[in-house]
Image (cartoon, rainbow, N blue to C red):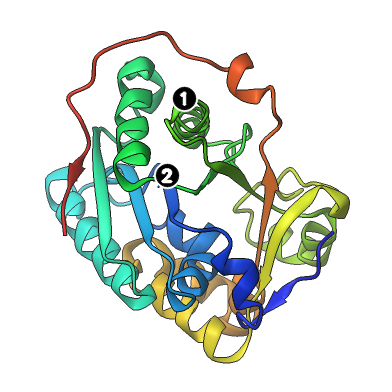
């Protein structure tokens, strides 16, 4: 595994990522899996763009209090506040309903993502791997769209899939049994040798990621309380990314189709 970059000391390594585009399913995915990377890239002078497929309007255990028409704009505001804390100022929405990405027209979705990658001249794309990190169907679908789009982009970017290592999973075994975010056994994990890029956050850098996560209060407040501050900080401090397998795009390709285009809102 490459040396973990600590507190963004390795500016050249981050700068080499160029224009970074994160493609995610719901508001808060970007903060959990790549807030450190986004902030590091911004600090290094890179252009950073975020794409979100849905408003996360069904992401609540209390739909009576938070019906979709109320939760969607709340989560939009949370996302903008979270990105602002990281210094990210360009964001695109895709027009999909939370929980319905698997039934969307994948060809259309892929073409919309590709449009963004081409328009911003993406050098690095960050998204979910084939397991979607948590196994969420929206995550898996969006990761597939982004992966196929990256393979078809005019300037083929480097493609990084968010991941967790076996060591990370083992270090949080007790926490995952107590608070089963991934299920009692934790997420799927990779060997250290598979990691292509990694960040370990502490001090002010971790504080910044925490600010981005706290902004997503509708999704993070209860989990922070359940885990406790120290455990939660340790849980989100490391970010790992693997190179997408060279044949993954071809194996998961989508058919051709027309797309109306992603909508930029900033």
- Report the front residue among 189 and 113: 113
User: Where is residue 218 drawn, in percent x and y?
Assistant: 32, 63
Q: Are marks 2 and 1 in contact (CB under 8 Å)?
A: no
Query: In the image, is residue 14 above or below residue 17?
Result: below
Does residue 18 appear anywhere in the picture? Answer: yes
Other residues around mark 2 within 10 Å, as few (<14) / some (14–19) / many (≥20):
many
Find residue 203 and report its image quarter. Answer: bottom right
Q: Report which residue position mark 2 lands on.
A: 23
User: Where is residue 155 drawn, in percent x and y?
Assistant: 46, 36
Task: Name the residue located 20 percent from the left edge and 30 percent from the top edge.
Answer: 261
- Report the front residue among 202 and 44: 44
Quadrant position of the C terminus in the picture: bottom left
Residue 152: assigned label: 1
Does residue 59 appear anywhere in the picture? Answer: no
Please identify the residue farthest to the front as the structure is shown: 155
Task: Name the residue located 21 percent from the left edge and 57 percent from the top edge.
Answer: 76
The disc, 2 or 1, on the residue closer to the chain's N-terminal end is: 2
Query: In the image, is residue 47 above or below residue 244?
Result: below
User: Where is residue 100 drawn, in percent x and y?
Assistant: 34, 27
Asked if residue 195 lies left or right of residue 265, the reply is right
Asked if residue 79 lies left or right of residue 66, the reply is right
Number of marks in the image? 2
Find residue 249 and report its image quarter. Answer: top right
Other residues around mark 1 within 10 Å, as few (<14) / some (14–19) / many (≥20):
some
Regarding mark 2 in the picture, which secondary structure is present there? strand
């Amino acid at each position: 595994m490459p040396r973990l970059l600590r507190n963004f000391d390795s500016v050249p390594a981050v700068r080499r990522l160029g224009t970074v585009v994160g493609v995610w399913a719901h508001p808060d995915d970007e903060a959990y899996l790549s807030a450190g990377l986004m902030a590091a890239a911004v600090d290094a002078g890179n252009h950073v763009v975020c794409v979100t497929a849905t408003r996360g309007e069904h992401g609540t255990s209390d739909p009576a209090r938070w019906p979709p028409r109320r939760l969607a704009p709340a989560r939009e505001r949370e996302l903008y506040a979270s990105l602002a804390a990281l210094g990210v100022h360009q964001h695109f929405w895709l027009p999909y309903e939370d929980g319905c990405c698997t039934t969307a027209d994948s060809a259309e979705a892929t073409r919309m993502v590709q449009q963004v990658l081409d328009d911003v001249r993406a050098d690095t794309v960050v998204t979910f791997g084939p397991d979607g990190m948590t196994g969420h169907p929206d995550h898996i679908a969006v990761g597939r769209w982004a992966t196929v789009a990256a393979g078809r982009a005019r300037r083929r970017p480097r493609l990084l899939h968010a991941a967790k290592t076996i060591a990370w999973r083992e270090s949080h075994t007790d926490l995952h049994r107590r608070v089963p975010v991934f299920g009692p056994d934790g997420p799927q994990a990779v060997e250290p040798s598979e990691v292509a890029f990694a960040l370990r956050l502490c001090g002010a850098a971790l504080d910044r990621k925490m600010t981005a996560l706290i902004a997503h209060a509708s999704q993070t407040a209860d989990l922070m309380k359940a885990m406790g501050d120290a455990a939660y900080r340790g849980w989100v401090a490391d970010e790992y990314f693997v190179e997408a397998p060279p044949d993954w795009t071809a194996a998961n390709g989508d058919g051709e189709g027309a797309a109306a285009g992603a909508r930029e809102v900033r």
